[in-house]
Amino acid sequence: MPSAPGPQVNPSILSADFANLQAELARIATADAAHVDVMDGHFVPNLTLGLPVVEALQRVSPVPLDCHLMIEDPDRWAPAYAEAGAAGVTFHAEAARAPVKLARDIRAAGGRAGIALRPATPVEPFLDLLPEFDMLLVMTVEPGFGGQGFLDVTLPKIRRARAAIGDLDVRLQVDGGVSAATVERAAQAGADVFVAGSAVYGAEDAAAAIGQLRDLAARACAH
Ligand code: DX5
Ligand code: ZN
């Protein structure tokens, strides 16, 4: 089934209070999904959470889970996140040995399959694979940490990815440094799913921050 049209905002719980994740999920009940950053301390120099925590989040989350796996050997680990009930499971192109097989495994387990690219990874080698995926994630910072500045050097890649997606039912997600100051640039380049960690969880009113990002993106897309 095609996903709903219009820009989506997925707050990253990396910037949430890890001691109160249930309450932190409740703060983003108006979001399209909760973005869950899984880091293994190898693919990226940071360690966050894994499958048991995702299973627990899945039980209490008011919104679907969008899992972003920054891990080595996703071929082995990614399908279990879909089996745990995550609506979306995105793995890194740089880490996967057999991305098409893995996308099919994720879909067979009931998840939407996503493929992610670090800022320096070109999109061109993956364009023919897009029909196997529900989402392409163009990282707009080096993965590993929240609170970094948006990398404008990724904008041409976002534009090329949007052109290649054409009529395919593939979402184009950006992640890293997305805020009220940068969301319009990303939307104009063609992104339609916006991950925001510090911009949402650092705000007094998370729902207002989500609404503002969605409105700015929708207006930027309309131009
Ligand atoms: C970075 C993560 C992002 C991060 C975004 O590796 O993938 O999801 O949480 O945080 P902000 O929006 O603060 O850049
Ligand atoms: Zn992420």
Image (cartoon, helix red, strand yellow):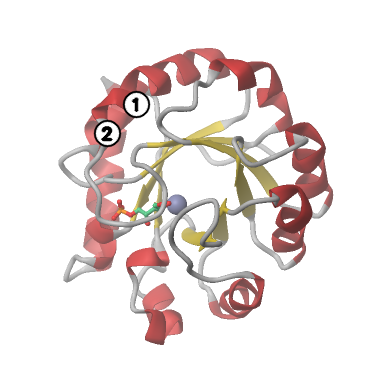
Residue 133: horizontal and vertical position, in percent?
Answer: 68, 34
Q: Name the secondary structure under disc 2.
A: loop
Q: Nearer the viewer, residue 187 or 51?
A: 51
Residue 118: horizontal and vertical position, in percent?
Answer: 46, 36
Q: Which mark is residue 154?
A: 1
Identity of the residue drawn at 51% across and 72% down = 62
Q: Which residue is mark 2?
A: 151
| Cα gap from disc 1 to disc 2, whole angstroms | 6 Å
Residue 102: horizontal and vertical position, in percent?
Answer: 77, 42
Query: Mark 1 packing: few (<14 Cα in 10 Å), some, or many (20+)?
Result: many
Residue 161: horizontal and vertical position, in percent?
Answer: 49, 20
Whether the residues at callouts 1 and 2 have beta carbons within 8 Å, the answer is yes
Q: Quadrant of residue 193?
A: top left
The three-letter amino acid code for the residue at tag 1 is Thr
Res. 15 visible in picture: yes
Determine whether 69 is above or below 220 in the image: below
